[in-house]
Amino acid sequence: MDETDEALMARIAKGDERAYHLLVRRHLPAMLGLARRVLGNAADAEDVAQEAMLRVWTHAPRWQPLAALRTWLTRVVVNLCLDRKRRAPWVALEAAGEIVDPARDVSEQTEVDERERLVSAAINELPPRQRTAIVLTYSEGMSNAQVAEFLDTTVSAVETLLVRGKQNLRRALGNVIEED
Amino acid sequence: MTNEQFQIFLDRNGSDPERWPVVDRPAAERLLAGDIKARTILQAAQRLDAALAHHGRDAHDDGAATARVLARLSGPLPRQKAQRWRLPTVLLDWQFAPAWPRVAALCACAVIGFAIGLSGVDRRIDGLDQAYASAPSNDLGSLVFEPEALTGARP
């Protein structure tokens, strides 16, 4: 049965737990990925995704379909991530669980892993709003106008965040990106 | 467009020409056609953008984390928030936020204006005396309807 998000939300508003778990399975992986990219920390990302999904359940009776559920959920996750970054410092974890590409030999794979680790570390060092703007632009494929909407700011402010973020990344990565 | 401006343009809009604003695209393409340094800047921007996009791709492939969160959500769910009285959607969609400070300022000015007007603090004390003293001579009603002071005759 391929029910729309709106239909599932109507059922959840009446306390239908089955509909809730169906909706969670549909959106959780993407929201978890978004939280992980914005926070740069797998454990915190799981907490944020769980909190966002619980809000779907608790707020369902009050939810109004003014925008797509996915848009509302993304906004909740982004706000929870920024709140978490404001509240407490975090400890960055090393990237874990990389899927090994059998086509590459070990030395090549190690080199690629090392470069990806450095890029991840540089992104994690960015200030939260710069990092969020970059993640929403490059990972979520959003336009500058969409990012401005999610960050509750103007398009020119988003452009400034992107320019500063990339300047910081170039400074941090040096010639890591140049080597190909 | 200079090379420095081109670098900022790429940082703002990305290295994919498909996403460049139509207004600025001709200037960027003219620069690329005639300047080797600009092409080097574009290639570096493309490598950085590819690395950023790849950073996002890794985060999608975490089935274990999804399973852990699903397991945590499988327990008893909290109580749902009570449903509010349902306003029509169009009312809920109105954006009051930008207007309320100005409306509040207008209301405050109106209240202060009424208070000043009712209390009379906007008039000078000696001015009040003069106003009361001159009132009978200027007051048409008293001239027409009040009795003569000495004789008591009415007009």
Image (cartoon, coloured by chain):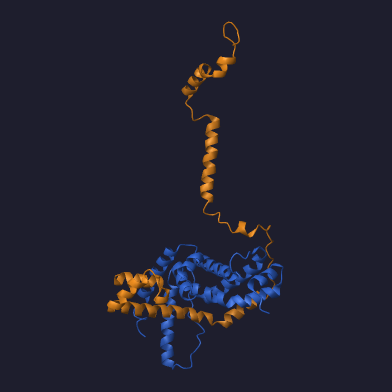
Q: Colour of chain B?
A: orange
Residue at the image point whose x is 56% and y is 76% from the top? A30
Where on the picture, by quarter, is residue A73? bottom right
Give the side of residue A100 with respect to residue A21, left or right: left
Please tell me which residue lies in front, B7 or A108. Answer: B7
Measured from the top left, where is residue A16 in percent x and y? 71, 72
User: What is the tally of numbered marks visible in this picture?
Assistant: 0
Measured from the top left, where is residue A69 in percent x and y? 60, 69
Give the side of residue A79 with respect to residue B9, left or right: right
The quarter of the image holding the C terminus of chain B is: top right
Residue at the image point whose x is 52% and y is 36% from the top? B113
Outermost residue, top side = B151
Q: Colour of chain A?
A: blue
Q: Is residue A47 above or below residue B144?
A: below
Measured from the top left, where is residue A135 in percent x and y? 47, 73
Measured from the top left, where is residue B63 in percent x and y? 58, 82
Residue at the image point whose x is 35% and y is 82% from the top? A178
Give the side of residue B123 with respect to residue A51, left or right: left
Q: Is residue B130 above or below residue B92?
A: above
Give the side of residue A40 with respect to residue A163, left or right: right
Please tell me which residue lies in front, A103 or A72. Answer: A72
Please tell me which residue lies in front, B151 or A25. Answer: B151
The quarter of the image holding the N terminus of chain B is: bottom left
